[in-house]
């Protein structure tokens, strides 16, 4: 990467971060004010603030195309305002070379957004929901940690995840004797809830200490309990807003395999897949507008930012209209999700073609 590539990438990054900070502050404040209505004796103001901070990355990702568009417009319009783009062109840099310098950080941005969606935003959102549920419920037998915990005497029960209509997955049971020695360990891949508080653990691995000898066995199923009843679980599952793209894909497959309605989950999955691509396309769309390439007389800095804001608002409204209309019309979820990004790429292509 040459000096020009690094300089343009740095300017774009500055624009993205600045707009992200401003929009995060605005929407974070609105979310915090809304969350204050849910404050109780157990769920206090600091808990509400922590919930908003943990969910802020996911909220930002949902607005990523608009944030990236405005940030790119801000950065490129700033270069144009300071006549830096004129200097770059005067140095013999072609339009193709300039667009390559813009495309490199755009590709890196797409990859970063995919990684953030899978490994940062969604896990933090899940952690926020779990903390909120446990704090508001104030249940003494639920402990904050990895997943959901319950203790009964010398037994500790851990459910790592709740998937597929409250089906517990990755279940661990630890039983100790009075001296603190582990005498029984059970792991189950999943569980089937009975009418009582007893669970039918499936795909079980068990290790027990019998006469000071470790005994291991694999079982297809093992009924144990009492644990949480079915009536207690509805307060515990995580919303689809906090599910990772891979989790949404898995959940959609489960719904299909059990002949349940899966269109909404499929649509949400494809939206998560198309969103980083849309953000990358916004960088290309912002380039001919913000940089004023191919024009002999560019618009003012403020006018370009206003145009960027207008385009961002229009895109957001149009994408919401397409999603709603596509669902009503029964269109394929992947087609509905990728239609907005196709329109953005098309608009960017037309503007770039006109600069030739």
Image (spheres, rainbow, N blue to C red):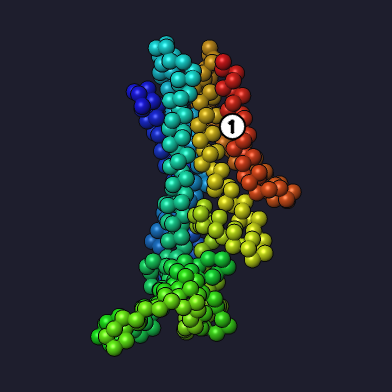
In this rendered view, identify the residue nearer to me: 283 or 54. 283
- Residue 9 location (% of width, % of height): 40, 30
The image quadrant where one finds the C terminus is top right
Which corner quadrant of the image does residue 139 belong to?
bottom left
Query: Among all residues in the image, which is located at the extreme right?
Result: 329
Q: Characterize the local packing of mark 1: few (<14), some (14-19) or many (20 or more) Cα atoms within 10 angstroms.
A: many
Relative horizontal placement of residue 235, taking residue 50 as reference (left or right): right
Compare residues 253 and 218 and report the one nearer the observer: 218
Identified at 40% across, 34% down, the residue is: 13
Query: Whole-percent x and y of residue 106?
Result: 46, 33
Measured along the vertical axis of the image, is residue 140 above or below residue 14? below
Residue at the spot of label 1: 345
x 27%, y 82%: residue: 181
| Residue at left offset 43%, top offset 18% | 85
Within the image, what quadrant is residue 187 found in?
Answer: bottom left
Residue 101 seen in this snapshot:
yes
* Percent position of residue 60, x then y: 48, 46
Q: What residue do we see at 37% from left, 67% from top?
A: 145
**Residue 137 seen in this snapshot:** no
Q: Residue furthest left?
A: 179
């Amino acid at each position: 990467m040459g000096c020009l590539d690094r300089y343009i990438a740095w300017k774009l990054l500055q624009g993205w971060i600045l707009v992200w900070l401003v929009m995060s502050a605005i929407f974070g404040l609105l979310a915090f004010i809304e969350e204050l209505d849910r404050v109780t004796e157990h769920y206090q103001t600091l808990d509400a603030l922590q919930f908003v901070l943990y969910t802020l990355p996911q909220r930002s990702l949902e607005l990523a195309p608009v944030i990236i568009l405005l940030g790119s417009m801000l950065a490129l319009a700033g270069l144009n305002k300071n006549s830096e783009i004129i200097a770059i062109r005067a140095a013999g840099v072609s339009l193709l070379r300039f667009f390559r310098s813009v495309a490199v950080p755009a590709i890196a941005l797409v990859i970063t957004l995919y990684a953030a969606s899978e490994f940062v935003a969604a896990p933090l959102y899940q952690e926020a929901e779990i903390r909120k549920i446990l704090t508001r419920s104030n249940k003494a037998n639920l402990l904050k940690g990895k997943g959901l915990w319950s203790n009964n005497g010398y037994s500790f029960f851990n459910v790592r995840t709740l998937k597929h209509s409250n089906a517990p997955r990755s279940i661990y049971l630890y039983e100790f004797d009075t001296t603190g020695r582990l005498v029984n360990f059970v792991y189950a891949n999943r569980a089937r809830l009975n009418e009582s508080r007893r669970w039918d653990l499936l795909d079980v691995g068990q290790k027990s200490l019998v006469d000071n000898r470790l005994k291991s066995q694999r079982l297809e199923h093992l009924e144990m309990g009492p644990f949480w009843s079915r009536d207690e679980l509805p307060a515990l599952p995580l919303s689809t807003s906090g599910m990772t793209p891979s989790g949404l894909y898995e959940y959609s497959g489960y719904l299909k395999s059990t002949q349940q309605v899966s269109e909404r989950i499929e649509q949400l999955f494809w939206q998560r897949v198309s969103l980083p691509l849309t953000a990358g396309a916004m960088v290309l769309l912002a380039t001919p507008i913000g940089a004023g390439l191919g024009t002999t007389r560019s618009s003012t800095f403020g006018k370009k930012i206003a145009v960027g804001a207008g385009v961002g608002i229009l895109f957001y409204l149009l994408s919401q209209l397409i999603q709603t209309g596509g669902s009503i019309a029964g269109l394929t979820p992947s087609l509905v999700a990728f239609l907005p990004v196709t329109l953005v790429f098309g608009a960017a292509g037309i503007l770039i073609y006109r600069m030739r």
